[in-house]
Image (spheres, rainbow, N blue to C red):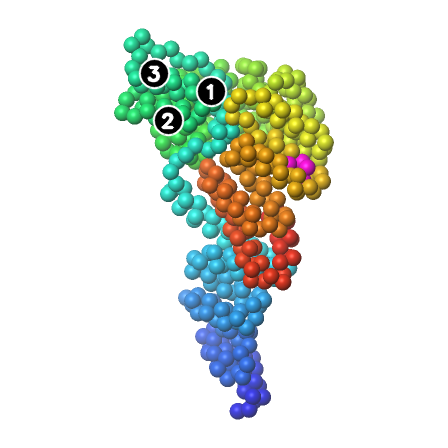
Amino acid sequence: MSLEDRAARAATLKAKGNTAYQQKKFAVAAELYTRAIAVTPRPEPVFFSNRAACYINMSPPLHHKVVEDCDAALKLDSTYVKALNRRATALEALEKYKESLRDFTAATILDKFQNATAAQAVERVLKKMATVDAATILQAREPRLPANSFVAAYFAAFRARPLPVLPDAASTADNQLLLSLQALEAGDYTHSHSLINEALDGHEPSWAQGKAEAYNLRGTFRFLAGDSQGAKEDLEKATKLVPSFTQSWVKIASVHMEQGDAVAAFAAFDSAIQYNKDDPDIYYHRGQVYFIMNEFSKAAEDYIKSTSLDERFVFSHIQLAVAQYKSDNIANSMATFRRALKAFPDRSEPANYYGELLLDQQRYKEAIEKFDRAFELEKTKKKAINVLPLVNKSLAIFQEKQDITAAVQLCREALQIDPECEAAVATIAQLSLQQGHIDEAVKMFDRHCELARTEPELVNALTYKYASAAQMEFMKNYPHLASQMGQLAQSLM
């Protein structure tokens, strides 16, 4: 046949294939497309893509053949969106999530973000990748303590208690317990952690209260290091030794919440109340659980109860104000914050959290003033400076002036003080996306993955990392379309 006859014959076979496909005769359609490919004088991507559509709809689907045909179509036309989507679907079914994400991302951008199905597919594959990889990473990772500022904030959420009095004939484990608690007071968390492990390494303190204190502290460190099961075992030992040890009951509730068991968490709070209904820590932390569950009115009631039992605990005042704000009681919230600022002039937390609410109201200058004040107070501390006011100030500057350079610089200052500040790392990563510095964003998201303590935190960090990496690959494969990456970066913020 002449070239013209071959082209006409191929077109006829393609049309017959289309008819068979519409009639859901996928095997017949695939054969007709195969004959069209064989006879056509010039290969056309649509022939391969259409045959791939047949393979993907067969029972069972022939995913490997779909990939092969889409490879052929995309060699002929690298911007062929249908082929990208079909190959991505097949790769997802083959559990080749990285390659699937690459194709769905490219299809989304090439379609100018108009294809909701492709955008949803990006999110779906990202979630699958991040969830699978997070579980693998956490299983292989050795438990470790998070940043000092995180550890300090956790311990600060419990009221200080006097150090235990050792027995007259104190054992080595007794002394190690006391040294561990003293190191904790000094903010030397690594040393405290090491000492409490030594105190329980084959030995125990010699009296019941000391044993309970030791298991409570080791359980706390295990919880902070992400070992929820080990934490629960230690904390339960503490409550068996001293059933009235309400702090351990409260921490058991925290473990249950991290494991997603709210019923067990509230049962632990009930046990704590049974032994000491006047312990203000119980109500503060139960309020935190209600807050996480978006039950802000119940949270406020518990914060008020906690404050009525001990008005000197700053966090009950702060969280009451935040709960009121979340309940749209703006005037009451601001009044509560102003009272807290007056009652705790030497604490940074009221100013920082008040600044966050002002930032939410787009009152940028007032917010920045509060963040500056909070950080000045933090710098007077001798241990574990909290750099969150610096990170919050960077967000305020970015939102007010879109000054990414200044915002990033503030976060870098925060990391100089606390190299493990997750908020600073995550903010730099997001701002790098805004600037189109995708390679820097990937590096920072990678660092965020290293710092993530819990599975949800790690899944979130991995999601951003993989999304950014897919964007980098798109820029490499389609350099002439790199300008469109700004819109995708905006959608990820």
Residue type beneath disc 2: Ser
| Residue under label 1 | 186
Q: Secondary structure at mark 2?
A: helix
Q: Which residues are magenta?
A: 394-398
Q: Is residue 329 or residue 425 the one in the foreground?
A: 425
Residue 278: x and y, percent?
49, 14
Q: Which mark is residue 194?
A: 2
Q: Residue at x 55, y 34 (%)?
A: 416
- What amino acid type is highlighted by mark number 1? Ala
Is 405 left, or right, of 163 in this rendering? Answer: right
- Mark 3 or mark 2, which has the lower sequence index? 3
Distance, label 3 to label 1, CA atoms, is 17 Å
Q: Which mark is residue 263?
A: none
Say which label, 3 or 1, has the lower sequence index: 3
Q: CA distance from mark 1 to mark 2?
A: 14 Å
Q: Nearer the viewer, residue 253 or 355?
A: 355
Q: Which residue sits at x=31%, y=8%?
A: 168
- The answer to if 12 sits in the magenta stretch is no
Residue 39 on image: x %, y %: 50, 84
